[in-house]
Image: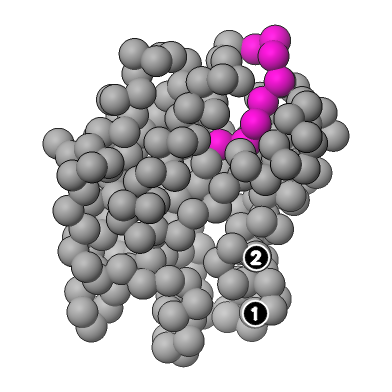
């Protein structure tokens, strides 16, 4: 298994802008945990992946694109890696969004190496799908900032976000850095306006995540 320093991508990476510019319909897969799945804490409103899907298929006039959300509450990088074929690769995706770390960070400092290794394996598995004729775009997301009072530590969330950044830099994946954006937006204070409880974004937080994703991936114009 590889680590962030050993990831062996196939050099067939691309960006979402480049893939959309080809004009062909694309398949997008959103893999992650409960924040990607969009359960409970939006209270019936759209999650960030649903907002992004609407932007792609309606706002950008790409109705032939297919968007698949395979997020599962409570999931970790290890879980996604074990089931990568079922939840990602069998769809022959053109774009894969991976948003993990919030549950992984519960392992604390001792779990950082394992998270880096599993996330690196996920990246490898996705990038190996790409060919010169049909490259794949990999998108990595950092977890949002959290408040105290829940099962995980804000410091560890930040540390695991750093691991995601390192992997994105190493692989050339597009990075959507929610953690940095939320930290800047709220000056390091808890982002209660965007949280339903100490960890999970509320509807406003999901919209903020969607807007940052759209800007980063070139879906906003």
Contact (Cβ within 8 Å) of mark 2 with mark 1: no
Among the two numbered marks 2 and 1 on one chain, the one whose residue lies closer to the N terminus: 1
Q: Is residue 146 magenta?
A: yes
Q: Does the magenta stretch include residue 187?
A: no
Which residue has dot 2 on it?
Answer: 215
Q: Residue 60, labelled with which disc?
A: 1
Image coords of residue 204 (percent x, y)? 80, 44
In the figure, is residue 104 to the left or right of 209? left
Q: Please tell me whether residue 2 is drawn above or below residue 17 in the rendered image.
A: above
Seen from the viewer's position, the closer of residues 129 and 46 is 129
Categorize mark 1 by other alpha carbons within 10 Å: few (<14), some (14-19), many (20+): few
Q: How far apart are marks 2 and 1 (CA)?
A: 13 Å
Image coords of residue 112 (percent x, y)? 35, 23
Image coords of residue 140 (percent x, y)? 45, 50
Specify the farthest residue to the right: 193
Image coords of residue 217 (percent x, y)? 55, 66
Residue 80, picture quadrant: top left
Name which residue lies at 29% across and 74% down.
135
Name which residue lies at 51% across and 47% down.
141
Mark 1 secondary-structure assignment: loop
Q: Give the range drawn in magenta.
A: 143-150
């Amino acid at each position: 298994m590889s680590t962030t320093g050993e990831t062996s991508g196939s050099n067939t990476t691309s960006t979402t802008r480049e893939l959309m510019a080809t004009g062909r319909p694309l398949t997008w897969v959103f893999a992650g945990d409960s924040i990607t799945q969009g359960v409970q804490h939006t209270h019936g409103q759209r999650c960030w992946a649903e907002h992004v899907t609407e932007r792609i298929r309606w706002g950008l006039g790409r109705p032939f694109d297919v968007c698949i959300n395979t997020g599962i509450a409570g999931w970790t990088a290890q879980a996604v890696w074990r089931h990568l074929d079922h939840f990602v690769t069998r769809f022959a995706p053109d774009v894969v969004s991976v948003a993990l770390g919030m549950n992984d960070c519960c392992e604390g400092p001792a779990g950082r190496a394992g998270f880096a290794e599993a996330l690196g394996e996920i990246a490898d598995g996705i990038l190996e799908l790409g060919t010169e004729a049909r490259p794949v775009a990999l998108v990595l997301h950092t977890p949002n900032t959290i408040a105290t009072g829940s099962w995980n530590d804000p410091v560890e969330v930040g540390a695991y976000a750093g691991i995601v950044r390192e992997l994105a830099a190493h692989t050339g994946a597009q990075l959507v850095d929610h953690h940095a954006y939320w930290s800047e937006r709220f000056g390091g204070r808890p982002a209660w306006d965007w949280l339903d409880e100490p960890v999970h974004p509320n509807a406003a937080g999901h919209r903020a995540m969607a807007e940052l994703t759209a800007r980063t991936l070139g879906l906003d114009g």
